Amino acid sequence: MKPSFAIVGCGKVGSALARFLTAAGYRAAGLASKSLSSAQRVAEMIGTKRFSRVNWEVTKSADIVFITTPDGAIGEACRQIAGNNGLRERSIVLHCSGSLSSEILFPAKECGASIGSMHPLQSFVSVEIGSNPFQGIIISVEGEPQAVDAARKIAADLGATFMEIKTEAKTLYHASAVVASNYLVTLLDLAFRLIEPAGVSKTDALKLLKPLIGGTLSNIEKVGIPEALTGPIERGDAEVLERHMAEIASKVPELMTIYKALSLYTIGVARKKGTLSESRAQMLKGVLGK
Ligand SMILES: NC(=O)c1ccc[n+]([C@@H]2O[C@H](COP(=O)([O-])OP(=O)(O)OC[C@H]3O[C@@H](n4cnc5c(N)ncnc54)[C@H](OP(=O)(O)O)[C@@H]3O)[C@@H](O)[C@H]2O)c1
């Protein structure tokens, strides 16, 4: 028989977990949320009458407790549950934050629970659920052995791939996800602004640059980094860099700092590829004022 679960925080992630854990045969011990209406909505969705505004009422009988409140409320919610005898013996307590480690669940550990974090690498945009958002994604997990074991089974039952990470590496792991996802948006905003003076609108810019972006991603998949790097820095072409910088200085000077920072980082990538000699690298750094 699959374990029972409680959800504390019936928002986007909590709703999806409730729905697809139930579909996978896990039994709902109860659902709690700050607003009763949120808990009730999820309870109706999965067909249970066990919902409450009081977190520790629903966690008491659960084998696995998911604290899926916003990150800032996880610690306090856990303290309250632990302080009100809201955990059964040898229960598992997990949260789903990407940036926080399991250590924030320490009050539950003091009550004898096994603690862990289970971060789905997915963007959940609504409490309205269509297809299974866990299907085929990575769920990264860290924490105590029993919690990690439980999360491994949950990931498999949700159709996701399990990946274990070190507790002390959690913050940098999350920084990596932010760079790969959020800063990709930032990088393309920068590209769009540089192409705008050429009379290309944002909509056209995406159409224009998309094949280039797709090709680069595909090259990274095929040959990896640094081999996928091309362009003036990889070729050691100082003149091109100088021309870029002169135009940026005259047309969009506010973008110079980020252009230089990205160029400097790229010199390091080109050195790793081996196509850029040390003397050429120094020349490019000189152009960048470093
Ligand atoms: N959204 C994503 O794309 C995503 C992806 C990966 C991981 N995560 C992580 O998943 C967790 C939940 O994120 P989310 O996006 O699902 O947030 P959300 O949609 O804002 O849901 C959070 C829910 O918790 C309830 N809540 C707030 N404080 C509470 C408390 N003290 N006790 C009980 N319930 C409380 C909220 O209030 P009401 O009861 O008023 O509705 C809301 O329903 C976070 O740790 C987040 O970092 C999110």
Image (cartoon, helix red, strand yellow):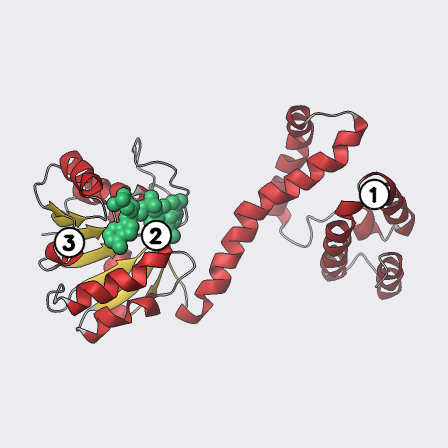
Q: Secondary structure at mark 3?
A: loop
On the image, the x and y values in percent for residue 150 come to 23, 60
Residue 267 appearing in the image: yes
Mark seen at residue 166: none
* Residue plotted at (27% across, 58% down): 151
Of circles 3 and 1, which is in front?
3
Describe residue 226's horizontal placement relative to residue 65 as left or right.
right
Q: Residues within 10 Å of mark 2 (few under 14, many from 20)?
A: few
CA gap, disc 2 to disc 3?
A: 17 Å
Q: Nearer the viewer, residue 165 or 30?
A: 30
Mark 1 and mark 2 lie on one chain; the one further toward the N terminus is 2
Mark seen at residue 248: 1
* Residue plotted at (11% across, 69% down): 89
Mark 2 and mark 3 lie on one chain; the one further toward the N terminus is 3
What residue is disc 3 on?
54
Describe residue 129's horizontal placement relative to residue 46 as left or right.
right
Q: Secondary structure at mark 2?
A: loop
* Residue type at the position of mark 3: Val
On the image, the x and y values in percent for residue 112 come to 17, 73
On the image, the x and y values in percent for residue 253 come to 81, 45
Q: Residues within 10 Å of mark 3 (few under 14, many from 20)?
A: some
Q: Secondary structure at mark 1?
A: helix
Disc 2 residue: CB within 8 Å of ligand 1: yes
Query: Residue 127, relative to residue 92: is it above or below?
Result: above
* Residue type at the position of mark 2: Pro
Mark seen at residue 70: 2
CA gap, disc 1 to disc 2?
A: 41 Å
Q: Nearer the viewer, residue 15 or 144?
A: 15
Mark 3 and mark 1 lie on one chain; the one further toward the N terminus is 3
Describe residue 116's horizontal placement relative to residue 88 as left or right.
right
